[in-house]
Amino acid sequence: MLNTLRNALTVPDIRKRVLFVFFAFAVFVFMIHVQLPNVNQAAWNSLIQSGAFYQFLGFLSGGALQHLSIIAMGITPYINASIIMQLMTVVIPQLEEMAKKGGEEGRKTISRYTRYLTIVLATIQATSMSIAMSRGGVFYDHSLQFIVYAVIAFVSGTMFLMWLGEQITDKGIGNGVSLIIFVGIVLRFPTQVSQTFSLANKGNVNWLGLFLWVAIALVTIVSIVFMYQGQRRIPVQQARRVVGRKLYAGRSSYIPLRLLPQQALSWFGGQNAHGLAGTVSFYVQTYFGPQSFLYNLVYFLLVVIFTFFYSAIVVNTRDIADNLKKSGSFIPGIRPGQPTVDYINKILARITTAAAIYLGLLAVIPSLQRDVGLTSLYIGSTSLLIVVGVALDSITQIEARLAMRDYRGFINR
């Protein structure tokens, strides 16, 4: 990995893109400290400490929620809008045809619809947040005009982050929105670690719990890397072709089905389900405590259900079988058509089962961390999943650009 980064920095085009990403990170950090005016910080801190949902969002936003910045909502509305649009492309035939056959123009149209939906979702979330903050005594000014001002500020902050993410995607390395979430999580690590050392100096840390937490974190990171890199390769054989008077032998290839899809704006397959299930579970915890067995069981089941649901939507086995048939390819031992669809569905069900159980276990790991007595480090498995996934995806894209550069150099020679 270090060699890849070192080689990348020697290439002017890649170096320029990497520097642009770090510049965008600096802009994000600056926006964290652009605070909303007329805020009672003491009341806001008390409100945050009373809700795990606020603590989780604050961790993902890099502390913007704690400062009550104009980007306090983060890029969550855009994520939700992207997920909804992906689901709608399956439900609405016109959108499905636009996504598959519309080409670049169709993708631009869907992106435009996603932005419009982001504005709607951000407005709803900002309105509910502003009204709740006003009633909770967070604002010194309780007038309707200031609430409208706060809503506009929050929505504008989210739209700015959406624009910044698109700029990173176009001019940088990797997926911009994923990198914004990545840096939001990483920015909170120093604060959490410093709190742990502060407690250690006061003698308030359970060292056995700290050791167990480190062990769990290392095992989790290794397992995430394994799951991201793991894939089920379905062998594919291409039939022999006759072109003119020449006979071309068939070639062998494979269809890679990943255990966990790579991170992208389509929201990382199982991670999307994990995030949706997590959102639902924050409402569930109103009735079931986070430490209870029932809460963790519901959380686990939600993750499993959403993983299966999202996998069934994203991977269209019928299209895979049709494309194989059109290209004159086939899976050895499997007839083209419906038998191929059934075979791929069977393999996909096994892969999804493993991924769903794995994501479900990751969802309840934070409860195990609390049980061992270490509560100062809120570095959940979802955060590790995002951080490791984005890092792997970025390195993969850098390697792809390096390989493309070497290929072009070979052609020039």
Image (cartoon, grey):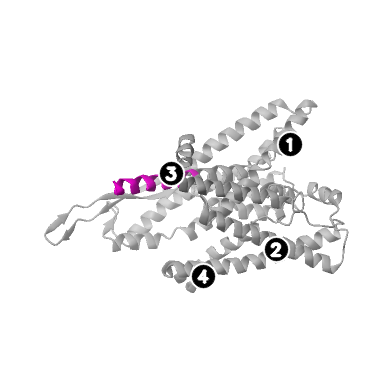
Start and end of the magenta stretch?
395-413
Name the disc covering residue 155, or none. 2
Left or right: where does residue 318 sit relative to residue 196?
left
Identify residue for label 1: 376
User: Residue flagged by tag 2: what amino acid is it?
Assistant: Val
Observer-side mark, 2 or 1, equals 2
SS at mark 3?
helix
Task: Please check the rendered image and state whether residue 352 is part of the magenta-colored stretch, yes or no.
Answer: no
Identify residue for label 4: 109
Task: Please check the rendered image and state whether residue 406 is part of the magenta-colored stretch, yes or no.
Answer: yes
Residue 235 percent across, percent down from the top left: 32, 49
Whether residue 305 is visible here, answered yes or no, is no
User: Please, which residue is most extreme toward the bottom here?
Assistant: 94
> Which numbered disc flags the more N-terminal residue, 1 or 4?
4
Observer-side mark, 1 or 4, equals 4
Residue 328 percent across, percent down from the top left: 26, 60
Identify residue for label 3: 399
- The reply to whether the C-beta atoms of the residues labelled 4 and 2 are less than 8 Å apart is no
